[in-house]
Amino acid sequence: MLTTAQAARRLGVKPETIYAYVSRGLLTRTKVNRVSLFAVDEVEALADKARGGITGTTERIRTKLTLLEGDELYYRGRRATDLTAYPVESVAHFLWTGELKDAAFEPIELPDLPDAGTLTDRIRIAVAVAGAHDPLRFDLSPENYVRAAERLIATIVAALPLRQEPAGTSLAARLWVRMSAEPVQEQLLNSALVLLADHDLAVSTLAARVAASARAHLYAVVSAGLGVMEGPYHGMMPTLAYRFLTSAEPDPIAALGERLRSGQGVPGFGHGIYQRKDPRAEFLLAQLRKHGPLPADDIIRAVGHTFPNTDLALAAMAKRFGMPPEAGEVIFSVARVIGWVAHALEEYAEPGLRFRAVGVYTGERP
């Protein structure tokens, strides 16, 4: 079932129009706890009719994983901020299997990786090498896939250089000692990993699903998602927010004014889906403030027309705990692998190669 807002978005109309369709007998409304719901198939049929029977494949992706509604984020019907109370390993299994269970992710040993490049370069190399060392990578059964995903995520973290001695066996603790030399804030980083694990059909997730539709194995699916993360409009945004916070340190208000004067947007603010708040950023910034004032607070107060997003929250965390500029990208990438795995498992149950699109040719005619 779809809510009124979801049905309106799918049909490209205002919510008021949905009720007009109900009065005309084009849609059937079902009320549950005083909430109007509409059958997916009925909405899809109306969308097909409106477009002459032509519908894009991406508009037909049905998922039981993530719901974005009312400026809130839910995983399988549970509020994501509530799930931060659990280890990210357990939340990963919840997204993959629907079961919130204890789990330990253990890495495999890799040969020495090259030191050149960025931390995200190192992640991509680690994924490729791990795939080459997995003789069962083409076994797409859910059981093998989940076990391989556990190993891969732990291996990605283990491939990053240490900044202090290991302190803890959880995924969050292992990642912290590779991001910061300060005392481990396991719960804080665990919360960030949980909240960033999935976000519906973000562009990197869509790329991962396209790879899965071709029955690509786990390492290829993750590589597809990582490729999109390299774009400045997606995975690199936390680094851009970090650089802005760094440049604004001497005079935050002047830096903000100069940014606005030049016509550039302020990195780390606003969102294409959320209207009034990013619940993930709101939660993380509140946790960060328990450790003292943030370098971003003056800017947040000055930017009154919009709200901070997770890019700013990750940048503020990196600044507060002496992490490298690209730490936000690394945390984002490690977390989002969890979501890509969950979406791939869903996609394997769909018809293969269903994303074969037909272009609208505008070139020279033969």
Image (cartoon, grey):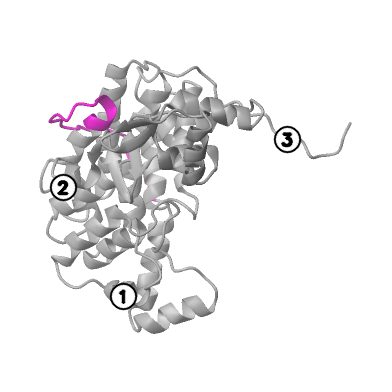
Label located before the other in sequence (2 or 1): 2
Between 57 and 130, which is closer to the camera in this rendering? 57
Query: Marks 2/1: CA distance?
Result: 32 Å
Q: Identify the magenta region.
A: 93-115
The spot of residue 49 in percent (x, y) is 61, 27
Q: Which mark is residue 301?
A: 1
Query: Marks 3/2: CA distance?
Result: 50 Å
Label located before the other in sequence (3 or 2): 2
Is 190 located above or below residue 245 in the figure? above
Which mark is nearer the camera, 2 or 1?
Answer: 1
Where disc 1 sits, the SS reads helix
In the image, what residue type sits under mark 2?
Answer: Ala
Residue receiving disc 2 = 173
Between 301 and 328, which is closer to the camera in this rendering? 301
Q: Is residue 174 left or right of residue 213?
A: left
Is 1 located above or below residue 84 in the figure? above
Between 75 and 263, which is closer to the camera in this rendering? 75
Q: Which mark is residue 360?
A: 3
In the image, what residue type sits under mark 3?
Answer: Val
Confirm whether residue 242 shows in the render.
Answer: yes
Label located before the other in sequence (3 or 1): 1
Between 102 and 358, which is closer to the camera in this rendering? 358
Q: Is residue 107 magenta?
A: yes
Give the quadrant of residue 335: top left
Q: Residue at x 53, y 37 (%)?
A: 11
Q: Is residue 173 left or right of residue 312?
A: left
Q: Residue at x 34, y 29 (%)?
A: 64
Rate crowding at label 3 as few (under 14), some (14 to 19) or many (20 or more) other CA atoms within 10 Å.
few
In the image, what residue type sits under mark 1?
Answer: Arg
Confirm whether residue 108 shows in the render.
Answer: no
Q: Residue at x 21, y 64 (%)?
A: 321
